Image (spheres, rainbow, N blue to C red):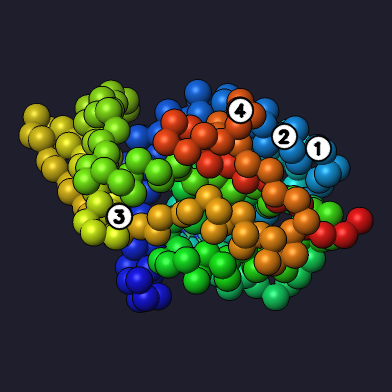
Amino acid sequence: MNNRKADEQAGDLFDRSASYERYVPWQPRLAREIPFLESKLRSVNAKEVLDCACGPGRHAVALAQKGFKIVGLDASSEMLMRAASHAGDESVELELVEGRFETLPPSFAGRFDALICLGNSLSAAGDPAVIEEVVRQFAFALRPGGVAITQTVDFSVAAREPVTASPAKHVCDDHGESLFVKSFVRVGKQVFIHWVSLEKSDGEWRSDVTLREITVVEPRFLQEAFSRSGFSSVESYGAYSGSAFEPGSSRDLILVARREGR
Ligand SMILES: C[S@@+](CC[C@H](N)C(=O)[O-])C[C@H]1O[C@@H](n2cnc3c(N)ncnc32)[C@H](O)[C@@H]1O
């Protein structure tokens, strides 16, 4: 995928930030993820943390509430507006930067004790060469001994089966009633996210269907990309409980990589 296509896709996510916020069950998700993240951040005595592709900033806010100084970076101004609004609601300070994880600002050089890149965001990179560049940028932004934590889905099934559908999600909230269905669709070597949302408004159901190519993140490729970019140890987990990664049955692929030095 070329950069223009990747830009269009960030645009797609930007248009659907409202649906993303409603689709994700934030409370259970954060309850599951934050303890793991906090313990890994404390293990390197992290003070300043970069949330790369922070989206609507839910992790950024939760970690700021734990006392970390958080910078959130995202390609979508719409997502960043949501992050600013949540930070305001919770009275925490976030520094929010519009930018791309494959070209971090020069002022980030060696600045961070830790970074997180969650929610399968690396699969939006476009192709493996861009993921390799993103990992180099992670090394650039971390101080020696700093830690990078990435989470992508376990693609072992999606890369093999023609269609992998998640259970439909029924949401009833202040915005009304909606039904969301997310699937991975494989065509040859390409994998797409197929997203259907049905939203009821004034008694009428409106549908929104999108198909977006994603990059399959291969566990070994990502681990080796970290090693090639100057990370000395790379731990892998299959869930935020800290269980081992088992291709095909793990919920997630979580890597915790330590930048060489100190
Ligand atoms: C699925 S959301 C994940 C958001 C959040 N990290 C989470 O875990 O909920 C993916 C995010 O990646 C962002 N994104 C996609 N491509 C990007 C890029 N090249 N640089 C920075 N952000 C990007 C999108 O704008 C979107 O907010």
Residue at 75% of width from left, 33% of height from top? 39
Q: Which residue bears the numbered disc 3?
A: 191
Label 4 and label 1: CA atoms lie apart by: 19 Å
Q: Amino acid at mark 3?
A: Val
Q: CA distance from mark 2 to mark 3?
A: 32 Å
Mark 2: secondary structure: helix
* Residue 61 in view, yes or no: no
Q: Where, quadrant-wise, is the C terminus in this rendering?
A: bottom right
Q: Nearer the viewer, residue 102 or 185?
A: 185
Could you tell whether 196 is left or right of 37 in the image? left
The amino acid marked with disc number 4 is Ser
Q: Secondary structure at mark 3?
A: strand
User: Which residue is the extreme one toward the left?
Assistant: 204
- The residue labelled by disc 2 is 38
Disc 1, disc 2: CB below 8 Å?
A: yes
The answer to whether the residue bearing label 2 lies less than 8 angstroms from the nearest atom of ligand 1 is: no
> Residue at label 1?
42
